[in-house]
Amino acid sequence: MKNTVKINSVELINADSLHYVATLPDNSIDLIVTDPPYFKVKPNGWDNQWKGDEDYLRWLDSCLAEYARVLKPAGSIYLFCGHRLASDIEIMMRARFNVLNHIIWAKPSGRWNGCNKESLRAYFPSTERILFAEHYLGPYTGKEDVYERKSTELKQHIMTPLIEYFRNARESLGVSSKEIAEATGKKNMASHWFGASQWQLPNEVDYRKLQELFTRIAIDKHIQQKLEHPHHQLVATYQSLNRKYSELLEEYKTLRRCFSVSALVPYTDVWTHKPVQFYPGKHPCEKPADMLKQIISASSRPGDIVADFFMGSGSTVKAAIELGRRAIGVELEADRFIQTTEEVEKLSKT
């Protein structure tokens, strides 16, 4: 049984995370930022409910399978994990996602400041990990790279005058790939110079060799000269068409995976955000608001849907609200859900 609360553009759900995400439609989430239990890191019951590491990893992989299903083709996922199983989780995650970064959250303060160094038998863990990933895109992955397809189609359309100039010349003379390779000394370029999908303009040296070949064949077949335009004219045409292509390509930018950082925010894979200090009612796994805002700003656009399937204190949801995103938050513990719902309602009224 789930309890759903809707607050403006936010939907909060009191339910088991895995059960709930299974009800979501395919390709419905723009950004997943979630902090599942790390297993045997916190003393709480929710962090110790599995029989062992293998049992925990099987459960987490079931979550990842659902995340891959609901995440849009151009979406991103940030998965928080503890230091102990981070490597295992990354390897497992790579089977479903293209992991872009294994981000280290190096906390500038924490329990390590007061540990008994002399009693240590290994280095004290002062970090958490964040796995940042995207979909594998392509014909065999189940998720289409719409931006790649659209941009390829656009380029072929814009470059049609040049593509047809080369293709028509070859077809009218019946020039083979072998003849082109022998004339230029390049075996695999015929499909690029005379095709459409990966078309490119030959350089001046290669073009002159092609002109000589085509002229010879045209004379032998008593056909009008082909490839008659000078190379500099083709270059000028290409540059003009390419400028037009670049301008029109801007319209497709929203089809790409969103990622935008600057020198004003951390843009390397080592982060040093300060942990959330204790306060009455603090969730033991609460993440810093500035870190979550950084993630959401970098990997989503206003109006996008941001999902946290282990909501806890609702920090991700709150950051999403402040940045003008829609949000979904799921929390299993009833008391925590009530507290977070009240906090989100209060924030939405300000």
Image: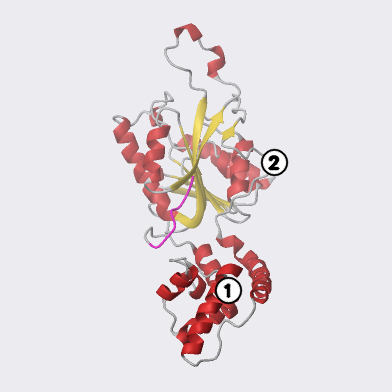
Of marks 2 and 1, the one in the foreground = 1
Is the C terminus in the top left, top right, bottom left or bottom right quadrant? top right
Residue 177 shown left or right of residue 7 in the figure: left
Disc 2 marks a residue whose amino acid type is Ala
Q: Are the residues tagged 2 and 1 within 8 Å (C-beta)?
A: no
Q: Residues within 10 Å of mark 2 (few under 14, many from 20)?
A: few
Q: Which mark is residue 263?
A: 2
Where's residue 150, x and y in %?
53, 68
Q: Is any part of residue 108 visible from this angle?
A: yes
Q: Nearer the viewer, residue 99 or 83?
A: 99
Q: Is residue 221 magenta?
A: no
| In this view, 194 is above or below 29 | below
When the figure is inspected, residue 13 is found, relative to residue 46, above or below; the finding is below
Percent x, y of residue 296: 59, 46
Q: Quadrant of residue 231?
A: bottom right
Residue 236, given in percent of the width and then of the height, sits at 68, 73
What residue do we see at 40% from left, 44% from top?
94
Q: Residue at x 28, y 30 (%)?
A: 51
Q: Residue at x 59, y 40 (%)?
A: 292
What amino acid does circle 1 point to? Arg
**Earlier-in-chain disc, 2 versus 1:** 1
The range drawn in magenta is 133-139
Local packing at callout 1 (Cα closer than 10 Å; few below 14, some 14-19, many 20+) is some
Give the CA separation, mark 2 to mark 1: 47 Å
Q: Residue 20: x, y in percent?
A: 40, 49
Question: Which of the pair 300/250 is nearer the observer?
Answer: 250
Q: How many labels sit on residues?
A: 2
Tell me the number on the disc at residue 195: none
Q: Quadrant of residue 257?
A: bottom right
On residue 208, the disc is 1
Above or below: residue 37 compared with residue 244: above
